[in-house]
């Protein structure tokens, strides 16, 4: 059901429907069919697509070389509450017209930050009440909430990792407000993305203290949220750099180590973002696999980088090959634990039509849907799994099996190898695997 405020912002655009591959309607899904069952679940259930409040409602196209290019009709009032309510009206009109079930926000995406903490808190509470009504009317849910602990100049040296305890305390106050809002809106998860948690120069940095302080901050968040009834997951969203030169949550492996070192493994998982993976010189699917191996594949921020430069360009996903490889990992590891797919992506600075927001999300949803269909076909209609199993068959029997079971010593390996002749050469068959994937695209 489409939810409108007093005004209709996206005039002429109706609810986006699945029309199939043959459709020429640019405002229709070609592959994302919410009710289609793939591998035992509907696409809607697999993906839990979410709109990112900051990019979709707030991303006006400013970059380091120039101001915004997009004059959003919901961003005209000088009264912060009026502006915030109009933004929320537009957000819910958008989400419901897209047919999505979820959204995600930072505290100050909802309403402009005030000059005092308590005034900011009041503003957020007003918006929480307003959003509750919108969510109830439309059956929309909050995938995750988070606090923006990186934009305000006070966080220039970090938030939880700040060398000045007073800034850490301020960040804690803001964190508490964001957790309260997330709980009040029945948010399913809470995200930590530490844009300024890291360092620019090691010369002026006590890395050990800073990282331990981030751990303490997260344990406080967990304890506070749990004691106030929050049952969801906490996610760390890894990113190697930008804005900080070196971020502590560099990649999935680094973040998993941090989670374990800080005793957070019962409550924390990862939110993997495509463009953050590639910034860390990994592939998206690599990061998903690392998270899945640790039982921490929680959620996805969907976007893509530009493979000719190294920036976090946050473009909408459109690479079917990348999505198909990612969905192979996704299906084989049983999907996401508690999270969903949040379009943390922005239309280009020169994509200035309101319609472009729809086209971008349609393309993103179709890319993931197509990736899922391809991955499902590869798993069910090809010998991919058999090939992969056979590659490791030597660990399934005999001495290989004993090795896996931990029954052999290094002396055993030595004796065994001396009895064997030079092992036979076995091809890795990479091209065959690649051909199988392409065959199903
Ligand atoms: C920035 C991050 C950010 C988080 C939420 O690069 O992706 O948008 O998802 O703070
Ligand atoms: Ni990002
Ligand atoms: Ni993100």
Image: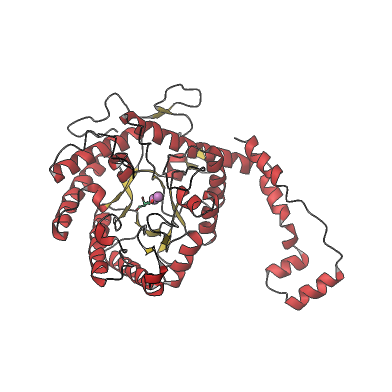
In the picture, the quarter occupied by the C terminus is top right
The residue shown at (45%, 21%) is: 24
- Where on the picture, by quarter, is residue 364? top left
- Where on the picture, by quarter, is residue 245? bottom left
In the picture, the quarter occupied by the N terminus is top left
Question: Seen in the image, is 194 located left or right of residue 322?
Answer: left
Compare residues 344 and 99 and report the one nearer the observer. 344
In the rendered image, residue 407, in percent from the top left (x then y), is placed at: 71, 74
Image vertical order of residue 16 relative to residue 400, above or below: above
In the rendered image, residue 316, in percent from the top left (x then y), is placed at: 43, 39
Count of number-bearing discs? 0
Compare residues 201 and 152 and report the one nearer the observer. 201
The residue shown at (68%, 67%) is: 404
Image vertical order of residue 22 relative to residue 209, above or below: above
Question: Seen in the image, is 156 located left or right of residue 46?
Answer: left
Compare residues 419 and 72 and report the one nearer the observer. 72
In the rendered image, residue 87, in percent from the top left (x then y), is placed at: 22, 40
The residue shown at (53%, 39%) is: 371
Q: Colour mode? A: secondary structure
The residue shown at (39%, 31%) is: 359
Question: Seen in the image, is 388 located left or right of residue 367?
Answer: right
Res. 335 visible in picture: no
Compare residues 274 and 305 and report the one nearer the observer. 305
In the rendered image, residue 376, in percent from the top left (x then y), is placed at: 58, 41
Res. 146 visible in picture: yes
């Amino acid at each position: 059901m489409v939810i409108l405020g007093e005004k209709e912002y996206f005039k002429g655009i109706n609810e986006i429907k699945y029309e199939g591959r043959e459709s020429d309607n640019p405002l229709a899904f070609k592959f994302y069919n919410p009710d289609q069952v793939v591998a035992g679940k509907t696409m809607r259930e697999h993906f839990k697509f979410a709109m990112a409040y900051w990019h979709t409602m707030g991303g006006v196209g400013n970059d380091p070389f120039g101001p915004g290019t997009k004059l959003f009709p919901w961003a005209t009032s000088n009264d912060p509450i009026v502006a915030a309510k109009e933004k929320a009206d537009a957000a819910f009109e958008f989400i419901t017209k897209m047919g999505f079930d979820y959204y995600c926000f930072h505290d100050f995406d909802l309403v402009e930050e005030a000059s005092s903490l308590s005034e900011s808190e009041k503003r957020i509470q007003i918006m929480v009440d307003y959003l509750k009504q919108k969510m109830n009317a439309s059956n929309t849910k909050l995938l995750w909430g988070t606090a923006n602990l990186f934009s305000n100049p006070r966080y220039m040296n970090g938030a939880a990792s700040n060398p000045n305890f007073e800034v850490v305390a301020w960040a804690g106050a803001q964190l508490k407000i964001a957790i309260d809002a997330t709980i009040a809106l029945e948010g399913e998860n809470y995200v930590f993305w530490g844009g300024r948690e890291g360092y620019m120069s090691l010369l002026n940095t006590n890395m050990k203290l800073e990282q331990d302080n981030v751990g303490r901050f997260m344990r406080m968040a967990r304890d506070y949220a749990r004691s106030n009834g929050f049952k969801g997951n906490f996610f760390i969203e890894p990113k190697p750099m930008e804005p900080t030169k070196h971020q502590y949550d560099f990649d999935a492996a680094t973040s998993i180590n941090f989670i374990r070192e800080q005793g957070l493994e019962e409550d924390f998982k990862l939110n993997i973002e495509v463009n953050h993976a590639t910034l860390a010189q990994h592939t998206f699917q690599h990061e998903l696999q690392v998270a899945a191996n640790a039982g921490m594949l929680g959620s996805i921020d969907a976007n893509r980088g530009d493979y000719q430069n190294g920036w976090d360009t946050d473009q909408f996903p459109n690479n079917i090959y990348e999505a198909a490889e990612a969905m192979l990992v996704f299906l084989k590891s049983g999907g996401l634990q508690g999270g969903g797919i949040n379009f943390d992506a922005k239309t280009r600075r020169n994509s200035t039509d309101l319609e472009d927001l729809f086209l971008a999300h349609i393309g993103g949803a179709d890319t993931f849907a197509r990736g899922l269909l391809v991955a499902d076909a590869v798993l069910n209609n090809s010998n991919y799994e058999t090939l992969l199993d056979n590659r490791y068959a030597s660990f399934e029997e005999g001495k290989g099996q004993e090795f896996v079971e931990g029954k052999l010593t290094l002396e055993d390996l030595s004796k065994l190898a001396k009895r064997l002749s030079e092992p036979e050469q076995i091809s890795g068959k990479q091209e065959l695997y690649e051909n199988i994937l392409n065959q199903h695209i």
